[in-house]
Image (cartoon, helix red, strand yellow):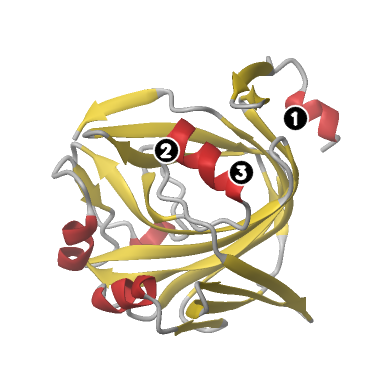
Amino acid sequence: MDPSTFFREIEHVQFPWRDRSIPIPAFYRDAGYFGAAFLTPLAAIRERLPSTRLHPVRIAPGTGLTTVTVIEYRDCDIGPYDEISIGFPVTIDRETSLLSRILPLRAPQMMSYILHLPVTTEFARDAGVEFYGFPKFVARIVIERDDGRWTGRLGEGGREILDLTVNEPPLHEAPQMRSHLLSQREGRLLRCESMHSACQIGSAKGKRGVELKLGDHPVADELRALRLGRAAYRFVVPKLEIILTPAIEGFDA
């Protein structure tokens, strides 16, 4: 897709903030991501959710998912930065039936509750916290690609959090996609939307081709406490464009 096609006719408003302005919605003109979803006991997920209105997506009896996604924003409105999203696929106010047959998850009612969202720049952290309520902190992220293997390394304060390596599955053309992201602020659940351009995507079920190593950081200890199991699926999107809305819907937690 021609870059001008995806963003064409979308109003791009400059919002004054601090000593500069931020365009809303945010345009990410060159990005890529990869990651994996890990089997996780529903009880462990529920302990980390901020509201009983949120229901973890179930892919087997008593089992949900924890996702780890490594994202590289190479050209965007707030400058290049990297990010690693740790979260849970959820629905709000109603539980889903078992969904193991549609991995990776694409159902429109699903959202992702963001547990941690480390980034590599202070500006990305500050804007994410203030505009979206995202749980961001500045961290060290190293992204490596070598012969079809994608690796993301995350650390903070001299301590290691995680290393994730994913083998790239075969790529195929994908249509425009949309994801719903949930955060919380002052007792409210906030939802924003992330629209993805038509792109190439690779995804594969099963534990093969995924390696996750946890370090000695408190966030790594949180992940251990979740009792992560084997990988349910992995995914790679080498290049795409993204439009990220501000928070557009709120719910009482």
8 on left or right of 64:
right
Q: Amino acid at mark 3?
A: Phe
Q: Position of residue 135 (x, y in %)?
A: 40, 49
Task: Please name the residue shown 64% across and 31% down the image.
Answer: 26
Q: Amino acid at mark 1?
A: Phe
Q: Secondary structure at mark 2?
A: loop
Does any portion of residue 135 appear in the rendered image?
yes
Identify the mark at residue 123; answer none if there is no mark: 3
Q: Quadrant of the N terminus?
A: top right
Looking at marks 3 and 1 on the same chain, the residue that comes earlier in the sequence is marked by 1
* Disc nearest the viewer among 1 and 2: 1
Q: Secondary structure at mark 3?
A: helix
Q: Are marks 3 and 1 in contact (CB under 8 Å)?
A: no
- The relative height of residue 80 versus residue 40 in the rendered view (above or below) is above
Looking at marks 2 and 3 on the same chain, the residue that comes earlier in the sequence is marked by 2
Query: Foreground residue, 242 or 223?
Result: 223
Cα distance between the residues tagged 1 and 2:
21 Å
Q: Position of residue 215 (x, y in %)?
A: 44, 84
Looking at marks 1 and 2 on the same chain, the residue that comes earlier in the sequence is marked by 1
- The relative height of residue 69 versus residue 49 in the rendered view (above or below) is below
Count of picture labels = 3
Q: Name the residue furthest front.
A: 19
Q: Position of residue 207 (x, y in %)?
A: 46, 81
According to the image, label 1 marks what residue? 6
The part of the image, by quadrant, that contains residue 229 is bottom left
Task: Categorize mark 1 by other alpha carbons within 10 Å: few (<14), some (14-19), many (20+).
Answer: some
Query: Foreground residue, 1 or 52?
Result: 52
207 on left or right of 4:
left
According to the image, label 2 marks what residue? 108
